[in-house]
Every structure is written in structure tokens, then in C-alpha cells.
Amino acid sequence: MSTETTTTTTATSRFNIWEWIFTTDHKRIGILYLIGSIAAFIVAGLMALLIRIEQSSPSTLLVDPSEYNVWLYFHGAAMILAFLIPGLTGFAANFFLPLMIGAKDVAFPRINAFSVWLFYGAILLALLSFVIPDGPDIMWTAYPPYSIITEGNTAFYVFTVHLLGFSSILGAVNFLITVIYMRAPGMGWNQLNLFVWTTVAAFVLQLVFIPVLAAAVTLLLFDKYLGTHFFNPDMGGDVLLYQNLFWFYSHPAVYVIFLPAVGILFDIIASMGKNRIFNYKACVYGGIGGIVLITGEVWVHHLYVSGMPDWIRIGQMVTTLLISVPVGLIVLSMWGTLYKASITYNTAMHFTAACFFLVLLGGLTGIPLAMTAITVHLSETSFVHAHFHFIMAMFSTFALFAGIYYWFPKMTGRMAEGVLGRIGFWANMVGVNLAFWPLFIIGVQGMPRRYPNYERFPQFEPYHDVATIGAFIIAVGMACTLINWIYSAFWGEPAPANPWNSKSLEWTHTANPPGPGNFSEDPVLDENWSPYDYEAK
Amino acid sequence: MSDETAAASVAASEGGEGHAGHEHHWEVSWAPLATVAGIVFLIPLTFASWFVYESTLLAVAFAGIGTPLLLAGISKWVAEGMSQKALVPGVAAIGLPIFIISEVLIFLSLFASYWMMRLGADTWPPEGSAEMPVLLPLVMTALLVSSSVTIHVAEVKMDRKDIAGFRTWLYVTIALGILFLGCTTYEYSHLVSIDFVPSTNAFSTAFFSITGFHASHVLVGLGIFIAVAIPALAGRIDKTFVTCASIYWHFVDVVWFFVVSQIYFW
């Protein structure tokens, strides 16, 4: 036990930039992922702000529709591919998964460094979209035929996906091997942190489903630049083939984001509530395992209005609704863990509590979208837009932020519990609800998604105005949060060794922050050890 | 796209073994960054310069920057991997098959696209298709299957510490792989000469995409073998590295059976 190691200085001897750029250490790679994904988040967030300003007026306010398309492209692609996925599976998994299982590093440290730089290569390509002539203007979905006939540079989109996909697949191989072979002696499968389980599940999904997306965009590249006809119905191709391949990955991608977010929340509520995980095995094997099994069979619900036989629609409605069962098991475990817990309401726990509310809203508004009869009406309206933002933008981002607050002392050796963080939280919480509730309402009334102008629906303008005000409040919240992190990382109050009195291995056995090799002595555990071994309540 | 993987499969962390806890230092390697930089210059930037912006000068410049970076990165990576001990010895031979799961899925997506087009067509092959040869795919199958046998023989020689024998059979494998790609080149040039190109029709679309994608994997496999062969000249052989190269090659061989049965003989 290294409880005597209290503050920052174990490993930070002298700052050496090359030790960071050429690093193969999982913690430093995790920090590199964090910096890259937060940078992508800031740029993509500014795009969202611009989009909201444009929509505050029914007619053209800032830009013409083609430039607006580039904003939409960057906002969607960067938020999902360069912020949420690398933030959750890149940063959080890299820094904390090896610590949680008692490993010195991941199994292939150099492949890990390779992955993070592929991610930066992809960010570079995405940012170049703004300066090259004819940047990609194809959303993050890149549906043909538009993505093939456009003047825009579809190739950059394709290669961005290739680089990120290759990075994630190698990450999957790396972390699966790490969890299988590098757990501390004595650590059994039912003694893993739930964050470890959810990360394993996310990487299994990445490994199996990303190649299909890679194939889809590769065929797009062939069609646009080499003259093939995969998506050209005139020559025997099929334009829906792309949509099927694309969503075959991109629906599971929701769970690649959702699952690690859930894992972070589990670890936080157990530590802050000093309680065991309720129904651990049902949650792991039924909940997480169930999602992994079902999530590959629901992608067609993204094509409900693209044209398909009714019997496929009905089948897809059943599988889509079926996923509520494993999700329900997970939610049950979460509430059961909170039951009779003595909860410490710090900033991490504020974000966590908000997640319970946001995931409920996002989940419940998903049910009408799964129903084929209702979804034909709601499809391509801002109801859909609001629904998936509650899950992706709010729930997952809040969970990641909760994780950053929870592990902040571990990463920096300092606390980030200042009042600025609380202001940031409340501004975010008020802002997101203000920004997205109106979109539900006008979505039901028929406001189309993705339109920069809506002169024919002037009655929607007040709702858009409220949403735009909400977006600015979010911007204030994000600014407070980021300033709080940067300030606290350098000048915050030094953290005690185990500020939350957690039983998890990364808190009990490593310094703040851990040095090279992580553990001063190799942890050895027995069958009675558990990361959630709190006294029974 | 996988030569780095196999090269890296012997990657190790030098701090992993033989140090007591407090003596760890931060591990560094410039190989991964150089390899990524090489890839970014050589593939996305060169491709976009050539096909999107139609600038030969830019394309040549980017390829000229990317190629040495890529080669330097891979060489350094192989050298480090072969001289350092892995955190979990030999585990790369399990990591590579996990990676191959994703390769299987990408080939499956290509075949699924082909099946969708073919089964949805009124007549097949569509108008303008070239007659598929019978003899050439059989010869190519024979070449690839025998190369799978020869790399296995090389592994047996390696296990018996017969380094000269290992090298010989490795060279034979590489030669067979090059012959295979020669057949591909011959066939492509013949087809192009009779105006059967990727844009001809749905069958040419599938034919060039699937055989081309497979050929690119043969090329990567050969690249890995060369990365094995160069240190082997100096007598340095890493068993895990050889095993990984061999597993990858067998995988490429198995995929070829699907290519032959679906494209040539259906």
C-alpha cells in the first residue's frame, strides 16, 4: 500500500517534451487522448454554437447552406469520432484500466502509442477540412449518392474514418489481451471493476463492427474516385447498401460510447456511496453481455423510412425494444447501488446524478422512435435530434466529465472541487435542458432536422431562440469547467492519497499520479478482495 | 495495413522485466509516431493530392516524405521489438488472431456487397463482362497453398534451430508470394487491355475491389516476411514474430479460397 505517498511529486521530476511525444506509457497516452479529444470537443462545440446562432433566425443569418453543411459535418463527425469515442475508450480506458486490474502497462505499449497518434492524424485531417478547397460537406453519415457526386473532398472523410478505425481496432486487441493476461494475481473475472467490464464490451464491439464501417467508406472511395458502381443503381449497385453497412457499425457505436460511460458512473456511485454493486453478475452477464449480443441486430431501425418490407420493420422494432431489457438490468443495478448508500455529493456525484435524469429522458424518448408507426412521422425531425443528443451529447459527456472529476486527483495529484466547477455543472445542466426540450416540442410539430433555414415555419422561431439561449448557457458552463480543470491541475489544493476512500485498486495501491510502472510493489489479491468491498449497509 | 501490427506484435516494454518497482523510468519510442506520420503522408495526403486535387507534384512530394518516414518507423519498431522482452512473452501470437477477426469482418462486408449486387441482378454476368479464365486462378491457388506449406516448413526448421533451412524456406515463400502478385498483375493488364476496368459494370466493380483488396493483403504479408527476413540474414530470429507472420499468411491464403470460389468459379 502506498498510502503514505500523498502528493504530486513521485514521478514529475523534470518536464521533458520528448518524453511525452515519444511516450509508450499508458497513463501519458491517456492524457494525450484527453488533450486531443477535449480540443476536438471545443472546436466541435463552437460549431454547435454557430449552428444554433444560424437557427435562431428562420432565414439565412450567417452563412449559405453549403458552409452550414461543413459545420454540421465537423460537429457530428468530431463529437462522435474524435471526442466521445477517444475520450471514453481512449483516455479513460488507457489511464485507468491497467491501474484497476493491477497491470504495469498495456500488453503492447508501442501499439498503444501508435493508436494515439493515428487518432491525432485523424484530427489533423478533420481540421484540414476547414482550410482545404472543397472540404467535406457530407454530414458524419456521408450517404451516397450525394457524397459521391459532391464537389467536396469525400476522401478526407474516408481517411479520417480509416485512421480512427484502425486506431480503435488496435486498441481493442491491446486492451482485450491486457485484461485477459495481465490482471493481478488472484483477480478473478467477478472481481473486475464495472468500468473494466464495460470497456471490454465496448472494445469487443469496436473489433467486430468497425471493419464494416471501414468497408462502407472504402467502397465510397472506390465509387467516387475509381469509378466502381457499388452504390449506383443504374449500374446494378444499391444505394441502400451503404446505409446498411454504415449503421451496422454506427448503431453499435452508440453502445461503444454508452457502455464505458455507464462503467464510469458505476465506479463513482460505489465510491461516493460506499456501497457494493447491486446484482453484479446480472449487470455484467445479463446487462452488458445482453447489449453486446443484441446491439448488432437493430441497425435497420435507422432505415425505417428508406424503404423496406413491413416484416423487416416489425422484426427490427422487436429487437430495438428488446434492448430495453439489458439496459433495464443495468439501470436496476445502478439504483440498487444507490439504495441506502451514504452519498457524498461532490462535483463528480453531481454530474453522475444528472446522468440518471438525462439517460431516463433519452431512453424514454427512444421508445416512440423505435415504434414503426410513430417513427414514420418523427423521422428526420428535430425530435430525433433532441433524443440522441440526450444520450450522446448529454448523458455520455456528463459521464465523462464525472469521470474526469472523480479521477482528477489520480491524474494530477490535486483536487478540482472549487466553486467554479459547481457553477460549471449547474450552467451545463440548465443549458442542456433549455437547449433540447424545445426541439422535442417542435419536432413533434414537424420541424425538420439539419435545415439552416425554415422560412415556411416561422412559428418555430421562439423555440429555436430558447434553444440558442440554452446553447450559450452551455458554453458558459463548459468554459467554467475547462478553466476549473486547467487551474486546478496546476494550482489546485494537493489531494490526499485516497480522497474518496475508495476500495478500488487504482486508489488503494498507486500514487497520485502514479509513476512509471504504476505499482511500487506488485499487488497480489485473494478471492475475498473486491473493488466494491464496502461494509454492508 | 497490418504490417505494423505484426511488426509490433513483438513489441515490448523494456521496463517490464528485471526492474524492481522504484527503478522504473518513462518508456519512450519514436517508432510509432514516425510510422503514423508516414502513413498520413503516404496514404490520405498522397491519395487526395492525386485524385481530388489532381496535382502530381503534391502527390510525389507527399509520397516522398511519407515513404522514408514509414520505412524508418517500421525498421525501428522491428529492431526494438526484437531486442526487448515483451510484458507478456509470446502473447502477440494471440493478439494477431484477435486482430484477424476484424479482417474477416471487412472481407465479409465486401463479399456481402458483392452478393447483394449479384443476387439482385436480372442477368449475371452483366453485359460487357470479360470471360473469367480457368487455368490462371488454379495456378494462383496452387502458388498460395504451397506458400502456406513452405512457411510452415520454415517454422519447423526454426524450431529445430536450423537457421539456414529457415531462411531458405522463407525465401521460397516470398518468391511464391511474388509470383502470385505477378499473376495478378498479368491478369489485370490483360483485362484492362480488353476494356474490362473497374467502371465497366457491376461485375468489374466487385472483381477489381475484392481481388485488389486481397492482393493488397498479400503485399502486406510479403512486407512482414521481408521484415522477418532482413534480421534473419544476420541470424536474428524472433519466434513470436515468425509465428505472427505465418498466421497472417495462412489467413490471406484462406481468404483466397473464398475469392476463387465466389469470383472465378461461380
Image (cartoon, coloured by chain):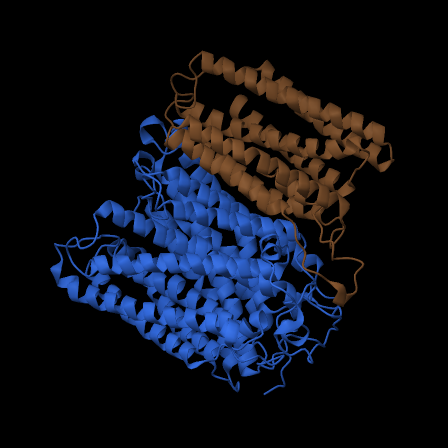
Q: Quadrant of residue B159?
A: top right
- Determine if residue A38 is in view: yes
> Which of the pair A511/B263 is nearer the observer?
A511
Say which colour chain A has. blue
**Image chain in brown:** B
Q: Is residue B237 above or below residue A260?
A: above
Q: Is residue B198 above or below residue A524?
A: above
Q: Is residue B189 above or below residue A209?
A: above
The residue lying at 42 percent from left, 65 percent from top is A397
- Determine if residue A210 is in view: no
The quarter of the picture where the C terminus of chain A appears is bottom right
Q: Could you say where residue A378 lies in the image, as x and y percent from the top left?
A: 26, 57
The residue lying at 71 percent from left, 45 percent from top is B80
Q: Could you say where residue B250 lies in the image, as x and y percent from the top left?
A: 68, 34
Quick check: A145 left or right of B24? left
> Which of the pair A343/A10 is nearer the observer?
A10
The quarter of the picture where the N terminus of chain A appears is bottom right
Q: Could you say where residue B246 lies in the image, as x and y percent from the top left?
A: 71, 35
Q: Quadrant of residue A193?
A: bottom right
Quick check: A261 left or right of A495? left
Quick check: B146 left or right of A375? right
> Which of the pair B23/A279 is nearer the observer?
B23
Q: How many marks?
A: 0
Q: Could you say where residue B106 lies in the image, as x and y percent from the top left?
A: 52, 39
The residue lying at 77 percent from left, 41 percent from top is B238
